[in-house]
Image (cartoon, helix red, strand yellow):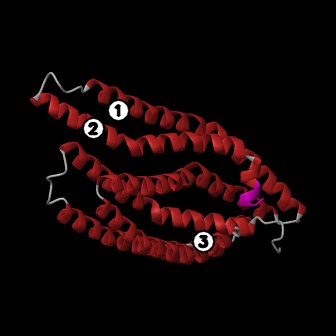
């Protein structure tokens, strides 16, 4: 069963979860704008008690905040039941398909276990992908309305970040194949009761996992160094604070941190995407025995 087949079969429950994730993400992205306006209103009210209305911005910010809470709560509420049912269904089909190909019993068991990586992708990584896209695009668009120069700097940094992570994904895909190949031998080796071979199996997993960790570290470190460019640009741009109110500065800083924090997921996302890509080939009906 391939990734596409899984999505088509379970499209409605997956779409429901992603809808809640999207509501949570979008409300989180726009929340700093409304909190910044509330902050400005409260500061202005402090100096002019009668003329400034802070009640309306307060209600709007609370409403946006509660939408974020509702989206996050429903996303977490339905996660467990939906994805546990998906795992049971997919694992069963994988075993049936493997049996039809007359695979070894040990290989069938390992493949049923490998399905957990699919479920982990849907449950954890797919929401992170949505967060990555929402946070990156949303933060840049929001910053553009405050100061286009900062937004242009963020856009310029995205290009090398994308290149580094695409390189990481290609390297990790090959390493994930080695890991999965080893896993498919596990039960057969246990059945043989040859402890030397079992020991060698676990030793064989060290090299690809270590290489993946190195590539993830390289990707993470390189991206963080590139983000220094944003900090330096913002530092010089915000020196001229005449046109920035306290609320606007808060919003800009909040969006910058959102943009920067979203890159923390990238190495793990690339590793998970590489794993799913290999499983997609491995579980394909056209796969050669």
What residue is shown with label 2? 37
Instruction: Pick the quarter of the image with the C terminus.
Output: bottom right
Depth order, front residue of 169/205? 169
> Is residue 192 among the parts visible in the rendering?
no
User: Residues at badges 1 and 2 in contact (C-beta under 8 Å)?
Assistant: yes
Q: Is residue 83 left or right of residue 70?
A: right
Depth order, front residue of 204/240? 240
What residue is shown with label 1? 61
Question: Bounds of the magenta span?
Answer: 1-5
Q: Quadrant of residue 200?
A: bottom right
What residue is shown with label 3? 176
Q: Position of residue 126 (x, y in %)?
A: 57, 53
Q: CA distance from mark 2 to mark 3?
A: 48 Å
Q: Which structural element holds mark 1?
A: helix
Q: Position of residue 266 (x, y in %)?
A: 46, 63
Q: Residues within 10 Å of mark 1 (few under 14, many from 20)?
A: many
User: Residues at badges 2 and 3 in contact (C-beta under 8 Å)?
Assistant: no
> Is residue 242 among the parts visible in the rendering?
yes
Chief secondary structure of the magenta portion: helix
Q: Number of marks in the image?
A: 3
**On screen, 270 above or below 37?**
below
């Amino acid at each position: 069963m391939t990734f596409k087949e899984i999505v088509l079969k379970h499209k409605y429950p997956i779409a429901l979860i992603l809808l809640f994730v999207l509501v949570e993400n979008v409300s989180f992205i726009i929340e700093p704008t409304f909190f910044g306006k509330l902050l400005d209103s409260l500061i202005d009210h402090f100096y002019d008690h009668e003329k400034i209305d802070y009640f309306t911005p307060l209600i709007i910010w609370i409403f946006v905040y509660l939408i974020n809470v509702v989206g996050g709560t429903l996303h977490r509420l339905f996660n467990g039941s939906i994805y546990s049912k998906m795992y049971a269904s997919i694992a069963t089909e994988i075993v049936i398909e493997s049996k039809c190909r007359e695979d070894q019993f040990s290989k069938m068991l390992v493949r049923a276990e490998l399905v957990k990586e699919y479920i982990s992708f849907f449950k954890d990584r797919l929401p992170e992908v949505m967060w990555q896209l929402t946070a990156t695009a949303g933060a840049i668009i929001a910053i553009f309305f405050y100061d286009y120069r900062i937004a242009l700097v963020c856009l310029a940094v995205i290009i090398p970040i994308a290149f580094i992570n695409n390189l990481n994904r290609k390297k990790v895909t090959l390493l994930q194949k080695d890991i999965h190949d080893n896993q498919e031998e596990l039960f057969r080796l246990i059945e043989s009761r040859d402890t030397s071979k079992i020991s060698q199996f676990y030793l064989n997993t060290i090299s690809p996992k270590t290489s993946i960790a190195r590539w993830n570290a390289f990707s993470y470190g390189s991206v963080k160094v590139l983000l220094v460019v944003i900090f330096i640009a913002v530092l010089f741009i915000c020196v001229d604070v005449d046109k920035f109110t306290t609320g606007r500065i808060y919003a800009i800083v909040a969006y910058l941190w959102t943009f920067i924090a979203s890159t923390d997921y990238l190495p793990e996302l690339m590793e998970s995407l590489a794993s799913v890509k290999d499983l997609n080939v491995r579980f394909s009906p056209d796969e050669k025995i």
